[in-house]
Amino acid sequence: MIDWTALLVNSLWILGAAVLLAAFSYHYWQAQVEGTSVRVQLERPSFSRPFWLGFVLIGLGLMGTSNRWWETAVWAVFTVFSLFNFYTTFKK
């Protein structure tokens, strides 16, 4: 039988990791096309938004897979920090 809750929770952190990989990959390619450094690309909002969104998804997924209360609390703090940074990318 499929554990749908575990599937959903684990798909969150996997999706977050995929978003991070896609953001890094795209901006690495964009740096080569534009002839700029990767550092310049990584400072753009087009990178920081998916970067922080990926960490929010990873935090949510790992928070859902935690077995101990303190582990859940650590991931919750990480997720709130990532969510705050994701929110601030829209203020720039």
Image (cartoon, rainbow, N blue to C red):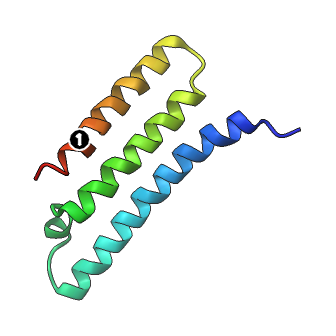
Residue that numbered label 1 is attached to: 85
Q: How many marks?
A: 1
Query: Is 79 positioned to the left or the right of 85 in the image?
Result: right
Q: Identify the residue at image location x=44%, y=58%.
A: 19
- Name the residue located 15 percent from the left edge and 61 percent from the top edge: 43
Local SS, label 1: helix
> Label 1: how many residues lie within 10 Å, few (<14), some (14-19) or many (20+)?
some
Q: Is residue 79 above or below residue 90?
A: above
If the image is split into quadrants, where does the N terminus sit? top right
Image x and y of residue 3, in percent: 78, 35
Percent position of residue 50, x then y: 34, 57
Q: Percent x, y for residue 25? A: 37, 70
Amino acid type, mark 1: Asn
Residue 42, compared with residue 9, is above or below; it is below
Question: In the image, is residue 43 above or below residue 12?
Answer: below
Give whichever of 70, 64 is nearer the camera.
Answer: 64
Residue at the location (36% across, 64% down)?
Answer: 23
Give the quarter of the image for residue 12: top right
